[in-house]
């Protein structure tokens, strides 16, 4: 019997031994983040960066945008003449169309009164709007797209990709033919209303692995998943240990204060979970920024840039003045609820414009100061 190969999901790679290359991480945050990231892709394509990335790691709302880009990668052909127009046609326009309809409330009502679960309804809506019958095997070989969910059973990150899906405790399913819509639905299954997504696995689907401590039923026969943001709201883990340069786009909402928090147990529990999520995200952000400040030559250091939907634009004054982004407008956009709820065209324009502007400022400030400053927003008549 041949020796079992090391499992690349077991987190054994040292943090200070990344390979050269660039990765893009797209956070969660519902339609707000989904649209914010469209502006990021727009600017990265103009800057010549999108075509260079070796991995795109995403969670939740970011996975909607990332999966559509992955599905259309060969049609867009980033870095080639006309790619921006194709990106707009193949990715921006369809994703905006999805943002023009309410998905979460409709799925909840349908899941209660019609056959099938709420998760099934969300996956069906994604399938109809963006992904059709595409599966994980329709993703490109390069760059590697990783769509992340959280395995409620094992308590760790569950990865969906073309080569495999799985986690380091349960094991991996090689070359999965799972529908892309189901993978995105699992990644964006916001708890408690859109969660969980359950995936049945055929007997023997999991590759034997002596390092996986949960390789037994029911872990290997039915996987119970929730939003990827529960474990890693910025999609960092699948890129952090692999690549030296990271571009981290954070569309996550800032926690608002509450003078009189609700005391009934459902709403109080929901508020407590929000506080926990906010603190975990803050700790990850501090780690990212500290690694960037240390530089890639330092142990655990990295090159790249982080930008967030709530990042004060004036922070870049003098270094990368960029486009006009008033603080009050930025705060309003950062406060758009984390929902899959219809957004009007003007709000969509503004979120895309803001993602474009803050990405530009961060990249020119911290990665490439020679990059030409843009002269207009993607939607100049609207602004931020």
Image (cartoon, helix red, strand yellow):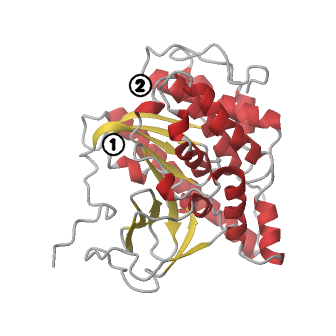
Q: Which residue is painted at 59% across and 64% down in the image? A: 186
Q: Position of residue 117 (x, y in %)?
A: 71, 75
Position of residue 249 relative to residue 14, above or below, is above
Position of residue 89 relative to residue 361, above or below, is below
Position of 79 compared to 185: left or right?
left
Res 157 → quadrant: bottom left
Q: Nearer the viewer, mark 2 or mark 1?
A: 1
Extreme bottom residue here? 217
Q: Position of residue 29 (x, y in %)?
A: 64, 50
Q: Position of residue 88 (x, y in %)?
A: 65, 31
Q: Position of residue 262 (x, y in %)?
A: 77, 66
Q: Which residue is painted at 54% across and 55% down in the image? A: 279
Numbered tag placed on residue 367 in the rendering: 2
Closer-to-camera residue (361/382): 382
Position of 31 compared to 313: left or right?
right
Closer-to-camera residue (272/85): 85
Numbered tag placed on residue 243 in the rendering: 1
Are there few (<14), some (14-19), or many (20+) residues within 10 Å of tag 2? some
Are there few (<14), some (14-19), or many (20+) residues within 10 Å of tag 1? many
Position of 344 compared to 323: left or right?
right
Q: Which residue is painted at 49% across and 64% down in the image? A: 177
């Amino acid at each position: 019997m041949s020796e079992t190969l090391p499992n690349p999901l077991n987190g054994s790679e040292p943090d200070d031994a990344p390979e050269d290359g660039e990765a893009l991480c797209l956070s969660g945050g519902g339609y707000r983040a989904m649209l914010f990231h469209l502006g990021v892709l727009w600017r990265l394509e103009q800057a010549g960066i999108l075509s260079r990335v070796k991995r795109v790691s995403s969670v939740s709302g970011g996975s909607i945008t990332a999966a559509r880009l992955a599905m259309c990668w060969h049609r867009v052909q980033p870095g080639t003449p006309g790619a921006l127009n194709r990106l707009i046609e193949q990715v921006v326009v369809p994703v905006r169309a999805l943002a023009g309809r309410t998905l979460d409330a409709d799925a909840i009502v349908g899941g209660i009164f019609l056959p099938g679960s709420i998760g099934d309804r969300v996956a069906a809506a994604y399938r109809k709007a963006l992904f059709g019958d595409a599966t994980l095997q329709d993703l490109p070989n390069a760059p590697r797209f990783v769509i992340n969910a959280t395995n409620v059973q094992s308590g760790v990150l569950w990865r969906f990709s073309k080569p495999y899906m799985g986690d380091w405790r349960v094991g991996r399913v090689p070359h999965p033919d799972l529908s892309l819509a189901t993978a995105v639905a699992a990644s964006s299954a916001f708890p408690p209303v859109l969660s969980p997504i359950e995936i049945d696995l055929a007997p023997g689907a999991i590759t034997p692995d002596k390092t996986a401590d949960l390789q037994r039923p029911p872990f290997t026969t039915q996987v119970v998943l929730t939003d990827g943001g529960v474990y890693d709201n910025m999609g960092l883990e699948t890129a952090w240990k692999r690549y030296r340069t990271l571009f981290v786009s954070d569309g996550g909402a800032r926690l608002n204060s509450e003078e009189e928090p609700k005391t009934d147990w459902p709403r109080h529990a929901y508020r407590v979970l929000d506080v926990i999520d906010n603190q975990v995200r803050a700790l990850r952000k501090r780690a990212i920024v500290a690694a960037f400040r240390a530089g890639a030559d330092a142990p655990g250091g990295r090159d790249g840039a982080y930008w967030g939907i709530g990042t004060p634009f004036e922070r870049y004054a003098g270094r990368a003045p960029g486009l006009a982004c008033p603080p009050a407008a930025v705060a309003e956009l950062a406060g758009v609820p984390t929902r899959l709820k219809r957004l009007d065209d003007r709000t969509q324009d503004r979120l895309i414009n803001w993602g474009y502007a803050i990405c530009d400022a961060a990249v020119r400030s911290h990665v490439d100061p020679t990059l030409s400053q843009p002269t207009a927003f993607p939607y100049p008549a609207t602004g931020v």
